[in-house]
Image (cartoon, grey):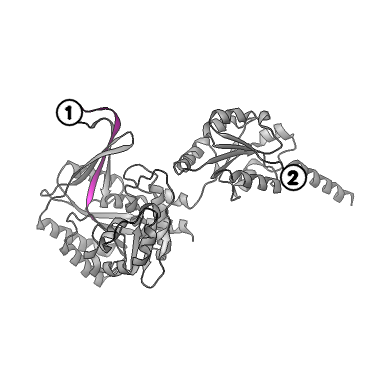
Amino acid sequence: MDYQTIIESFRHKKVLVVGEVMLDVYLSGTSKRICSEAPVPVVDVESSLNVPGAAGNTAVNLAALGANVTLLSITGEDSDARTVISLLHQAGVDTRHIIRDPGCHTISKRRIVADGQLLLRYDSEFGTGSSGYERLLIEQLIALYPSVDAILISDYCYGVISQQVLETLRRLMRRNPKPLVVDSKNLLPYRDLQPTAVKPNYQEAIRLLDLDYAPNGQRVQQMLSHGEQLLEMTGAEMVALTIDNEGALIFRHQQPAHHSPAKSVVNPRPAGAGDTYVSVLTLALTTGLTPPEAADLAMAAANIVVNKDGTASCSHQELIDHFKPKKVFETVHELNEHLDADRQQGCKIVFTNGCFDILHLGHITYLSQAKALGDKLIVAVNTDRSVRELKGPERPINPLEERMLVLAALDCVDYVIAFDEDTPVELLQSIEPDVFVKGGDYTEESLPEAPVVRALGGEVVILPYISERSTTRVVEKLRAYGEILCEV
């Protein structure tokens, strides 16, 4: 599947998001003492971050993915409304159709975080609003509907999506069907709309089905037998059921369930991951992808977001890069950015180095054994200059760029980087691998890298030497063969 072409097509899609927009506020700092008035921590706030939440975060995700996004919502006429609308506008969302009702309070969720730990959240809720502003929202919905490719409902059940709004949408859908994706805390009112897809999370699904929580790790198995029931209850063509770290299940009538696994993350921070998932799912369903393919693409985006702090989004470039794995790096800084993400997922980093001039069976065996010692294998390659210093003026046979690309083509190699020094000590000090590997033609005592790795808390492993397998021997054979041909 050419996901990169599909993702590029997102740039031409027009999506209308309807639902509650919120302001998410993160007050972050440190806590080193207890309050004298009550046994609670005192947080010295060092930073404040404001981001759009709920339907606002969904709209930001769609815009970040390159779509043309219009947000239809109701806020209060207050400072939080001004803040969130400004943020949405900066993110590329069309905010001209957000209706400001002085009778409402803009929804906000303020979080206090100390040393990375969430301590408290306090909310400001929507209020009742007025029927006049509801009629205005319906008029906007009727006007915007014909020009969009898809509609995404982000309903947190604060009252923006009223029964009258649903009835209007139902009439519009009957006259001019379009992809409709619903992400709602309560999916039952949407049954008559027969949505293209609904996206309950696990908690919402078990509430619909009146089931008890299953232990973590057993929830996919629990839900597999309830697909038809969810489809019937929601009236949807497709149910995309997200189950946190167990991934997502896709249910369709008379079709086997499809499971999109989540990527393992050591310390997941999933705020907004559902918004990312449903945004990509909506766009993918407008491109002709099958539901399982669309779901896998959506899960890839959600996997990117769970590695981020707070309410986050997945950009168009991040999703493109996800399907274009980068192996060859020019700078150690760029490599370390990838390694940071690997380490957050609990990966064990293995490092080796060499000239790798003419790749042969000895190299392949050695690199496969090195990869088996961990999860990610880095190969540091001597530059052409340093190869000449080590091997003589006639080497390397192949230039650096070609040697790196050949190594990157191996499944067992995850990252390739060059170094020009006599030894890769500087790289090792920057990367701090868990394991440093060399071949059996070395001893630990002869390696200047070994004490550096040990001092960094790493392990040094010497792999067995494979006799009669070396680049020098291959070159000698080639030269001998050339001389024979010349004589003939």
Which element carries disc 1, helix, strand or loop? loop
Name the disc covering residue 249, or none: none
Taking the spot 64% from the left edge, 44% from the top edge, the residue there is 403
Q: Identity of the amino acid at label 2?
A: Arg
Quadrant of res 256: bottom left
Magenta part, dominant SS: strand
Residue at the (18%, 54%) spot, across then down: 158
Residue 331 on image: x %, y % = 53, 36
| Residue in front for this viewpoint, 156 or 387 | 156
State which quadrant residue 251 falls in. bottom left
The residue that disc 1 covers is 37
Locate residue 192, reporting x and y percent: 23, 70
Q: What range of the chain is rendered magenta? A: 18-35
**In the displayed structure, does residue 43 sit left or right of residue 416?**
left
In the picture, the disc for residue 469 is 2
Residue at x 35% of width, y 52% of height: 276
Q: Residue furthest right?
A: 487
Q: Of tags 1 and 2, which is closer to the observer? A: 1
